[in-house]
């Protein structure tokens, strides 16, 4: 029995051609949309990775300048930038707990100060190790502690600035008097500079 010409009498190859046409039309319509979505996801992932690298580099650059704005700002974004890594977050919390712990009492000896600094360096290096691991850097904790540098002049300047700031605050709050002593000039020093030397000239023939 022959099938009359019509839609339901199409052969398999005809159905295959129809399916190909339908899939082609869908690809033409959805292809650009999918491509845009994939591009956006790639850009978002790349931006997240860029921020992570920037945070890591800022902490590495300022690991001996912990009071700098870059160092503090980078620490404060670790919870958001590395929220997907439990080890980084655990090391971060340990370091923050150490920073927020009780300071050394006044008059601490050199040994106590050294232990305090070493402990703080250890938890910070642990944090940097975990961030480096997350980003694919094979860091050594001992080398992190050993190969970092800050000029002694920076340390001295920071200590002097802190001392000056503390004295200024106490002075403004009335907790410290401003010492004033009479000025005793050196009698041998000239009060005024000498007048400029002018050579007097007389008219010729006089």
Image: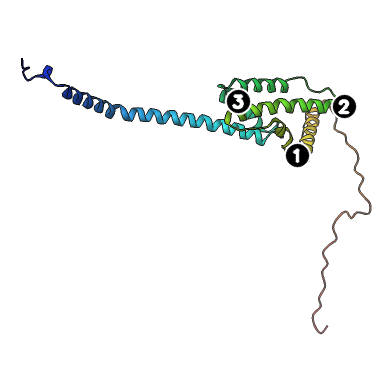
Q: Secondary structure at mark 1?
A: helix
151 versus 171 height, above or below: below
Q: Are marks 2 and 3 in contact (CB under 8 Å)?
A: no
Q: Residue furthest bottom?
A: 205
Q: Are marks 3 and 1 in contact (CB under 8 Å)?
A: no
Q: Residue 48: x and y, percent?
A: 52, 29
**Which residue is depicted at the point 74% across and 38% down?**
150
Residue under pointer 3 = 78
Label 3, label 1: how far apart the Cα atoms are: 26 Å
56 versus 12 height, above or below: below
Count of picture labels: 3
161 versus 79 height, above or below: below
Of the residues tagged 3 and 1, which is closer to the observer?
Answer: 3
Residue under pointer 1 = 154
Q: Residues within 10 Å of mark 2 (few under 14, many from 20)?
A: few
**Which residue is depicted at the point 57% across and 24% down?**
82
Picture quadrant of residue 14 = top left
Q: Residues within 10 Å of mark 1 (few under 14, many from 20)?
A: few
Picture quadrant of residue 52 = top right
Q: Along the line of sight, which residue is nearer the eye, 181 or 129? A: 129
Label 2, label 3: how far apart the Cα atoms are: 34 Å
Residue under pointer 2 = 109
Q: Residue 102: x and y, percent?
A: 77, 19
Q: Residue 144: x and y, percent?
A: 70, 33
Label 1, label 2: how far apart the Cα atoms are: 22 Å
Q: Along the line of sight, which residue is nearer the eye, 103 or 198? A: 103
Q: Secondary structure at mark 3?
A: helix
Q: Are marks 1 and 2 in contact (CB under 8 Å)?
A: no
Q: Is residue 203 left or right of residue 31?
A: right
Q: Quadrant of the N terminus?
A: top left
N-terminal label among 1 and 2: 2
């Amino acid at each position: 029995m022959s099938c009359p010409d019509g839609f339901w009498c199409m052969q398999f190859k005809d159905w295959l051609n129809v399916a190909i046409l339908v899939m082609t039309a869908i690809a033409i319509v959805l292809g650009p949309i999918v491509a845009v979505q994939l591009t956006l996801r790639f850009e978002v992932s790349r931006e997240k990775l860029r921020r992570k690298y920037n945070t890591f580099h800022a902490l590495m650059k300022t690991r001996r300048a912990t009071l700098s704005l870059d160092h503090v700002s980078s620490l404060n974004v670790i919870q958001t930038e590395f929220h997907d890594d439990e080890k980084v977050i655990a090391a971060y919390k340990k370091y923050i707990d150490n920073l927020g712990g009780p300071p050394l009492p006044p008059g601490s000896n050199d040994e106590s100060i050294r232990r305090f600094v070493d402990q703080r360096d250890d938890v910070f290096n642990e944090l940097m190790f975990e961030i480096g691991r997350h980003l694919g850097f094979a860091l050594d904790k001992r080398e992190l502690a050993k190969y970092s540098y800050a000029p002694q002049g920076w340390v001295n300047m920071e200590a002097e600035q802190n001392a000056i700031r503390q004295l200024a605050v106490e002075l403004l709050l009335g907790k410290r008097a401003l010492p004033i002593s009479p000025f005793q000039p050196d009698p041998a020093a000239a009060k005024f500079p000498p007048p400029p030397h002018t050579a007097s000239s007389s008219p010729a023939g006089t």
